[in-house]
Structure formats: C-alpha cells, structure tokens
Amino acid sequence: MNPLLGTALLLGLAGSAHCLGMCGPIALAVPSPRPDWRSRFSSTVLLNSGRVATYALIGAAFGFFGHGLRIVGLQQASSIIAGIILLLSIVVPGALERWLPASRAALLISRLRSSLARNLKRTAPEALVLTGMLNGLLPCGLVYAAAIGSAVMGTAGQGALYMVLFGLGTWPMLFALRMGSGLLGQQARQALRRASPVLVGMVALLLVLRGLELGIPYLSPISPLIGAEASACHP
C-alpha cells in the first residue's frame, strides 16, 4: 500500500482542530430537520458527505494531473517541488492560501459565501449535501496541502481516495461539535493543533523521498521505467 494514504487520514485527524475554525461555524449554522438526535446525526452525515465528495473531486483532478506528469516524465521533479512547497508552508503559515491571485480569490469566496448563505436554512437532504459540497470549496491551506499530496498518487482514483481519507480524518471533531458532545477537550484540541505541522512535514518529506527515488521500498521506490532502463543497460 502507498504509505502516503496513511498520512492522508492522519493529516485530516490532526488538522481537524483547524477545521473547527473554518467549517465549525457552518456546521453549527445549519439546522436539523427535527430537534431529535437522530435527525441531527443524519444531517451531520449529509453535510460531511457533501464536503468529502468535493474533496474526492479535487483529489481526482490533482491525481489526474499527476498522472499526466508521470507520463511525460516529470512526476519525480514535481514530487520534490510539492514537498518543498509543503515545507515552506510550515515555515510561512498561510502561504498556501495566498497562492491564488487576491482578486480572483476574493471573487470566489464571495460567490461561495453567497451560495452557502442561500442554503444554510434549507434542511432537505439534497440541500444539506450541497451545503457540504460548497463548504469543501472554501479556501483552506490544509485542503491545499492534502491536494498536493493527492497529485503525487499517480492516478485520478488514487488521488480521490487520498482526499476521501483526508476528509474522513476530519469527521470526529466536526461530528462532536455538531452533536454537542465533549468528545475532545481543550487539551486534545491543542495537541491536534501542535501535531498538524508535524504531519504536514511528514507528508512533505515523503514527497521529497519519493521524488528522489532512492530505491527504499515503499518510501522511495525506483520507478518501473527507470528500473527497466537499468535492466536493459546491464543484461
């Protein structure tokens, strides 16, 4: 199994404390169809399913892009560059959010917020899923970090799986918030916040190692193409 898949789940779990600030207000603002806990639970599932569906589409797009890079022989360099970008994002927090031109980002955020505002009070199942999907499109450095990881997975399917695992890692915290449970206290949230840059760093180092192709099984394997060329040179 690709070791990066494991980091996706851990990255989502550690970054879920960050999600409370970004997605928490939206989760709390959306009403349940009925006041009972079953209705709140089902609406929470629909909201988060919509958000993860958006993540899966993002992962598929980035994975497809990474597949194209592999075909033209640029995935090795792109993996190293992606790792360096993630390391820089730890040193300069918020750098990933500033990738988009300010004017375009402001326009995108404005449109997304308008769409969210129109759906926040709707409790039909399709409206809850749509709200979750729009929520998943809001600019977020943690999502960008996961998307970079999905680009190196090599296929659209693997990229989508990477982002789904990342999204599932954020579920426990947001479920606890919306269900009104004290599942994670303040100390646990602080621990998750401290762990987030560590896990982003782990993903970054894995990306660099994979790009270097040092011949380390699972962590830094040599690509089949290079291995075939080496066999041809040394019969």
Image (tube, rainbow, N blue to C red):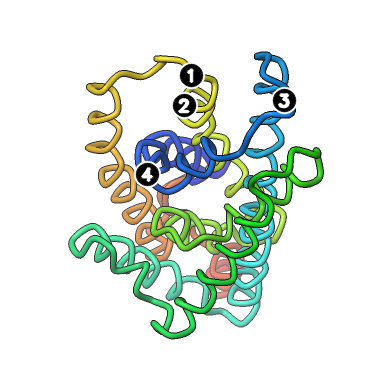
Q: Disc 3 designates what residue?
A: 42
Instruction: Identify the secondary structure beneath mark 3.
Output: helix
Label number found at residue 21: 4
Label 1: how many Cα within 10 Å (few below 14, some 14–19, many 20+): few
Residue 165 at x, y percent in the picture: 58, 40
Question: Is the Cβ of the residue at disc 2 closer than 8 Å to that at disc 1?
Answer: yes
User: Picture quarter containing residue 77?
Assistant: bottom left
Residue 52 at x, y percent in the picture: 64, 45
Question: Is the Cβ of the residue at disc 3 closer than 8 Å to that at disc 2?
Answer: no
Q: How many marks?
A: 4
Which one is in front, 45 or 85? Answer: 45
Q: CA distance from mark 4 to mark 1?
A: 16 Å
Question: Is the C terminus in the top left, top right, bottom left or bottom right quadrant?
Answer: bottom right
Q: Residue at x 58, y 53 (%)?
A: 136
User: In the rendered structure, which amino acid carries the disc numbered 4?
Assistant: Gly
Q: CA distance from mark 3 to mark 1?
A: 14 Å
Q: Residue at x 38, y 76 (%)?
A: 99
- Mark before the other along the chain sequence, 3 or 2: 3
Q: Looking at the image, is 8 positioned above or below residue 68? A: above
User: In the rendered structure, which amino acid carries the disc numbered 2?
Assistant: Leu
Instruction: Identify the secondary structure beneath mark 2.
Output: helix
Instruction: Identify the secondary structure beneath mark 1.
Output: loop
- Mark before the other along the chain sequence, 3 or 1: 3
- Mark before the other along the chain sequence, 2 or 4: 4
User: Picture quarter containing residue 79?
Assistant: bottom left
User: In the rendered structure, which amino acid carries the disc numbered 3?
Assistant: Ser
Q: Looking at the image, is 213 positioned above or below residue 13? A: below
User: In the rendered structure, which amino acid carries the disc numbered 1?
Assistant: Gly
Q: Disc 1 designates what residue?
A: 180
